[in-house]
């Protein structure tokens, strides 16, 4: 046990920042931005401090544990703690927030009909960061639920106040859809509490719940409540239609946080809550979920192939990738689940690279996200085109980039369990390449399109925002150990909590000897 | 069981071989405009540095006994989870050694040549950056000690190829060709990816040492599956039937790229993959047979396309397909053929690079024109290019003592050891090679000048002709040098194994017959294209000629079978998603929210949509469920 409540501090810093920014006098926009950036960077620095203290080799999967009774009557506590999975997702959020702040430096000014102020925009982003940290750090189901729902508020305003033409429709759709999912989760959570109370004192404590032995029939019912909420959040086919609207209406920065981090709450929830608390139900539903994941993988990819709007294309591409992540979780292999977590991080980074580069482009052309409005950008803005291509390559999981590590591990883990599922999912890499490169071809190559000759190339601020994302994508692709070292023990824990074991290689001896030691 | 030695001496620098050009690429691509001036020279230097290091390693390796020549260097643990552990680790053995030398030495020459060829291109810094990236990736491909790391190199060269084919991406045709190359290669990558997965679930490891060491314990069905999947990968990268359609379009790239990537090195990666995996193919008869069949089909497809094209680069590209077909065929022959597949790969790497650079030199003097019908009589104005190209010509058609003679003859001989039909077909292929290459040389350098009005051909500068001369010397002596001085068979034997079988034809008879076919083919070519003046507009041609001009309908087949159905499906799903899935959701919202007015507007036919969408969704789910159940 540590004495410093690191996670509380970590969550509080952006919240304080948000309050400071919001309380700044009107009209001091530059200061608001600078303060927001400083707070986001401070959060990132703190995250690094926490991550460095995290001991991947420890026998304790959860570290930095805090627990304070909150509503003792219902066994609700303010409980925080992270395992490797929570840690890397918090790190992802903490990395992307300063990136998004820097990238969105002039977002509000460039939206003439925005209904909110500059400081409001950045205050909302920081507030959102607090809820993201909270949701990944909560070890009390009720606390998790609170963060899960509160998170909707800043997101709703970010879309509804600062988004594009369709923003009201998109924001309401996002909110209603999420609330519906939350409602089911709430019901299931109450059910879970009732079940836990049968053995004496009821609790929302994750550690107690994960250790409970709930009878399979009850599990099957409660599982669905949680899963439905997560499937909407992720989103899994066919609960996805809010995402293209939301991503299409949101500012690129908001969309990056929405797709890159918020949607991960869904897949994170599956691996943290559905699996360990309802192992029997997870096993029972796995075939259906794998089927939905596969359908989503291909469905998203094919719809992305036919999209005429870049932002919607990114949304469908993400939906396809969420299919892959969910697949990796529900094949119940160590490699698949580790791969899913790596892919969650990788997808956050690749989404940021592609969406922000596209955002910089759209900003230069009256905000149009129509692919048909662009052509030959590479000639006019080669640096922008270069980052855009990098984003496309990260999306198609080019080997050498971190998305490849995640994707390949998921495919391998799936193949290990269900040969044909893995084999069919692998075919997806062709369609992914097709839509990613087709997008690049149509927008960036060929003769320069009308009205695009004069668009300037990326400026220092924009390059600065993109560089960390690019660097991390490459570095973690070549050296994924910082992620794998903390994620793998957490996955071992998940695997043992659901009682799953990996299929052994056909030829007995396991190949841990990667060196060719046989003489 | 093979012995794997730790990396000592110069071998401790194996990683530097890759790191040098990679650093060059990073500096050139990230350095921005300030590197414009000296960047290209840095690009050349990094590759020359790797080449020098490669030579030092060769010398050190030659000093070792044959069984100690497999060197391993482990950098760090790369991808791991319970039961999975893959290192960032390199393996330098006799096979990767010859590849390192081919890549870095030919790569150096082509880098130097590009200094002249790309002199006036505004983006030449980027060009050299991509070229460096390619060299680094290709070295990684051949130096990886496991299949997953090989995959990184495999896609890395694909990326470099994509970037360089589309180097002049302002041209829509170049951008389209680049995308096509990448996507077709991705189909091959599915094969490689799945092969790695099968290996992992079978052997629990993906390192060469573990896979090959346990191969004998695996079932033949498994090995056949791995072999066929690897073949699919090889078909993509090496432009073999049925994934050949991208290579001809790839000629949109600058000519040095065609020489280095699409002739000498990258496209031969498929041959490397198969020969490297000999432990698999030796135990999978059907997979090996499939390799031979694919190779033979491509020998003829390439040769026929090469015979019909008027574009000098596309004709050479057809020739490359065909020559790689020879290598693939040889690789499919098993231990009888592995070393000769590599032997031909090396000689071809040199003479085909020379031919492509020669074509580039011609184009340089012809305002980038590629149409051989507008060439002619260039021997009078481009003496060095003509002589070096002619040497390359003699090498590729297999006239003794030029390089291609030795390597092609060995393949034909090995083919006869396996089966007379294979051997006979390869001899026939050699005849067609004689034809199309003679046609090319006759149309380009001989006959009357058919130049366009504003074209004033001239010999290229020394920076371009010197690489041509060096490659011409290589095309002359490399065959003999490798065979008689380098003892290529003994050199590779510890990696690939070697075997001989009695042949129905004596060596002398094989040589005699194949030379006769070559001479007949060549004579037809010379007579057809020298006796009469070459018409400037192509005659209509026979059915076969017309088919060959359309790449034997490769694109049309892809279009009908894959591209159009994909876009059709994509459009249907876009519509389905908007009208039905989203419509369903909004419909529910409408019900729940009681937006009766809105509902009324949608009402006609809405219920039907629900029903259909639910049926559609249910069918999908059931199908997917069946899939899970089946496995």
Image (spheres, rainbow, N blue to C red):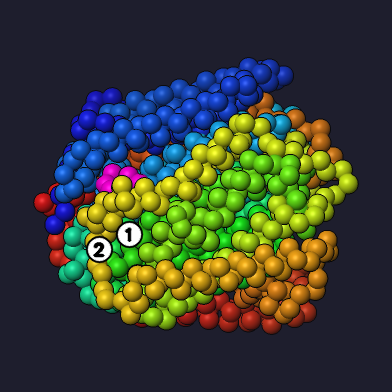
Q: Nearer the viewer, residue B421 or B218?
A: B421
Q: Residues within 10 Å of mark 2 (few under 14, many from 20)?
A: some
Residue B93 is inside the magenta segment: yes
Position of residue A45 measured from the top left corner of the image (x, y, whole percent): 41, 24
Residue that numbered label 1 is attached to: B339
Magenta portion: prevailing SS class = helix
Residue on which the image places disc 2? B498
Left or right, B492 with respect to B251, comes to left
In the picture, which quadrant includes the N terminus of chain B?
A: bottom left
Give coordinates of residue B15: x percent, y percent.
Answer: 33, 35
Disc 1 + disc 2, Cβ < 8 Å: yes
**Which percent across, then down, holds residue B81?**
26, 50
Same chain, marks 1 and 2? Answer: yes
Whether residue B31 appears in this view of the structure is: yes
For mark 2, name the chain. Answer: B
Q: Which residues are magenta?
A: B92-98
């Amino acid at each position: 046990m540590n004495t410093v409540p690191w996670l509380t501090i970590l969550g509080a810093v952006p919240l304080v920042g948000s309050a400071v920014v919001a309380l700044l006098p009107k009209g001091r926009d530059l200061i608001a931005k600078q303060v927001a950036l400083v707070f986001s960077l401070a959060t990132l620095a703190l995250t690094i401090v926490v991550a460095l203290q995290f001991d991947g080799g420890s026998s304790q999967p959860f570290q930095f544990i805090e627990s304070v009774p909150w509503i003792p009557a219902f066994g609700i506590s303010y409980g925080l703690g992270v395992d490797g999975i929570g840690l890397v997702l918090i790190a992802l959020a903490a990395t992307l927030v300063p990136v998004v702040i820097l990238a969105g430096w002039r977002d509000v000014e460039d939206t003439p009909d925005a209904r909110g102020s500059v400081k409001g925009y950045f205050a909302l982003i920081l507030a959102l960061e607090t809820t993201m940290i909270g949701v990944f750090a909560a070890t009390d189901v009720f606390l998790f639920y609170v963060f899960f729902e509160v998170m909707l508020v800043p997101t709703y305003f970010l879309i509804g106040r600062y988004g594009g033409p369709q923003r009201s429709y998109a924001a309401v759709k996002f909110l209603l859809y999420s609330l519906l999912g939350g409602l089911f989760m709430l019901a299931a959570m109450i059910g879970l509490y009732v079940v836990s109370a049968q053995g004496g004192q009821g609790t929302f404590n994750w550690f107690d719940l994960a250790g409970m032995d709930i009878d399979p029939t009850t599990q099957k019912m409660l599982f669905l409540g949680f899963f439905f909420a997560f499937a909407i959040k992720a989103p899994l086919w066919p609960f996805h239609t809010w995402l293209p609207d939301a991503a299409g209406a949101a500012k690129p920065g908001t969309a990056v946080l929405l797709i890159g981090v918020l949607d991960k709450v869904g897949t994170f929830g599956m691996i943290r809550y559905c699996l360990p608390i309802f192992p029997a139900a997870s096993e029972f539903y796995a075939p259906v979920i794998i089927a939905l994941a596969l359908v989503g993988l291909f469905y998203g990819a094919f719809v992305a192939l036919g999209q005429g709007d870049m932002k919607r294309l990114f949304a469908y591409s993400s939906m396809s990738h969420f299919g892959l992540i969910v697949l990796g979780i529900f094949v119940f292999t160590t490699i698949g689940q580790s791969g899913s977590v790596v892919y969650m991080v990788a997808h956050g980074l690749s989404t940021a690279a592609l969406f922000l580069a596209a955002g910089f482009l759209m900003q230069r052309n009256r905000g149009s996200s129509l692919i048909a409005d662009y052509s030959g950008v590479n000639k006019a803005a080669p640096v922008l085109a270069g980052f855009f291509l990098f984003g496309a390559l990260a999306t198609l999981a080019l080997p050498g980039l971190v998305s490849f590590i995640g994707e390949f591990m998921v495919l391998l883990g799936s193949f290990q369990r269900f040969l044909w599922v893995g084999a069919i999912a692998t075919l997806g890499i062709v369609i992914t390449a097709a839509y990613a490169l087709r997008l690049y071809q149509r927008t960036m190559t060929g003769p320069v399109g009308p009205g695009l000759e004069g668009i300037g190339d990326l400026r220092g601020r924009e390059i600065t925002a993109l560089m960390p994302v690019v660097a991390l994508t490459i570095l973690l692709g070549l050296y994924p150990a910082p992620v794998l070292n903390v994620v793998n023990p957490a996955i071992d824990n998940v695997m043992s909590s659901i009682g799953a074991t990996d299929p052994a290689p056909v030829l007995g001896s396991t190949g841990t000897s990667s060196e060719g030691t046989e003489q | 069981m093979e012995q794997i030695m730790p990396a000592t001496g110069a071998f401790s620098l194996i990683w530097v071989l890759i790191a040098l050009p990679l650093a060059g690429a990073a500096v050139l691509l990230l350095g921005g405009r300030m590197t414009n001036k000296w960047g290209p020279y840095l690009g050349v230097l990094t590759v020359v540095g790797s080449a020098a290091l490669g030579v030092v390693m060769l010398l050190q390796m030659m000093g070792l006994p044959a069984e100690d020549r497999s060197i391993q260097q482990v950098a760090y643990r790369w991808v791991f989870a319970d039961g999975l552990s893959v290192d960032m680790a390199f393996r330098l053995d006799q096979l990767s050694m010859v590849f390192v030398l081919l890549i870095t030495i030919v790569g150096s020459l082509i880098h130097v040549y590009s200094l002249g060829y790309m002199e006036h291109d505004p983006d030449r810094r980027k060009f050299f950056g991509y070229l460096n990236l390619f060299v680094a990736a290709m070295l990684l491909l051949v130096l990886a000690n496991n299949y997953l790391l090989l995959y990184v190199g495999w896609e890395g060269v694909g990326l470099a190829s994509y970037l360089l084919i589309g180097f002049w991406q302002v041209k829509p045709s170049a951008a389209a060709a680049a995308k096509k190359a990448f996507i077709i290669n991705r189909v091959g990558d599915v094969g490689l990816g799945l092969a790695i997965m099968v290996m992992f679930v079978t052997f629990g490891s993906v390192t060469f040492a573990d896979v090959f060491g346990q191969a004998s314990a695996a079932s033949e069905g498994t090995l056949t599956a791995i072999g066929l999947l690897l073949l699919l990968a090889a078909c993509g990268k090496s432009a073999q039937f049925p994934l050949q359609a991208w290579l001809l379009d790839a000629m949109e790239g600058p000519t040095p790229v065609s020489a280095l990537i699409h002739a000498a090195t990258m496209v031969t990666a498929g041959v490397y993959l198969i020969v490297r995996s000999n432990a698999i193919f030796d135990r999978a008869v059907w997979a090996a047979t499939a390799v031979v069949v694919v190779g033979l089909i491509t020998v003829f497809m390439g040769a026929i396309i090469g015979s019909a094209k008027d574009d000098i680069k596309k004709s050479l590209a057809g020739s490359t397909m065909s020559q790689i077909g020879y290598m693939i065929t040889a690789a499919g022959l098993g231990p009888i053929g592995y070393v000769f597949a590599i032997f031909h790969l090396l000689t071809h790497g040199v003479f085909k690079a020379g031919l492509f650079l020669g074509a580039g030199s011609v184009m340089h003097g012809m305002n980038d024109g590629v149409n051989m019908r507008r060439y002619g009589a260039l021997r009078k104005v481009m003496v060095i290019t003509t002589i070096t190209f002619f040497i390359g010509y003699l090498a590729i058609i297999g006239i003794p003592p030029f390089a291609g003679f030795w390597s092609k003859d060995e393949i034909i001989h090995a083919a006869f050891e396996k089966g007379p039909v294979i051997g006979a077909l390869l001899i026939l292929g050699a005849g067609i090679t004689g034809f199309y290459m003679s046609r090319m040389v006759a149309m380009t350098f001989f006959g009357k000048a058919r130049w366009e009005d504003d074209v004033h051909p001239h010999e290229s500068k020394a920076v371009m002709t010197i690489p041509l001369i060096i490659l011409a010397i290589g095309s002359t002596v490399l065959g003999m040098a490798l065979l008689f001085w380098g003892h290529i068979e003994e050199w590779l034997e510890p990696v690939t194994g070697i075997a001989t079988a009695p042949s129905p034809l004596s060596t002398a008879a094989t040589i005699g017959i194949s030379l006769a076919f070559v001479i007949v083919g060549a004579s037809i070519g010379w007579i057809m294209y020298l006796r009469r003046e070459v018409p400037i507009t192509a005659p209509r041609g026979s059915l076969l000629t017309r088919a060959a001009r359309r790449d034997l309908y490769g694109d049309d087949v892809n279009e009908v079978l894959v591209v159009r159905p994909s876009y059709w499906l994509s459009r249907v799903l876009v519509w389905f998603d908007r009208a039905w899935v989203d419509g369903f959701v909004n419909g529910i919202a409408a019900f729940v929210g009681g937006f009766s007015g809105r509902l009324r507007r949608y009402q006609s036919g809405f219920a039907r949509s629900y029903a259909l969408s639910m049926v559609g969704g249910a069918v999908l789910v059931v199908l997917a469920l069946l899939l899970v159940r089946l496995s």
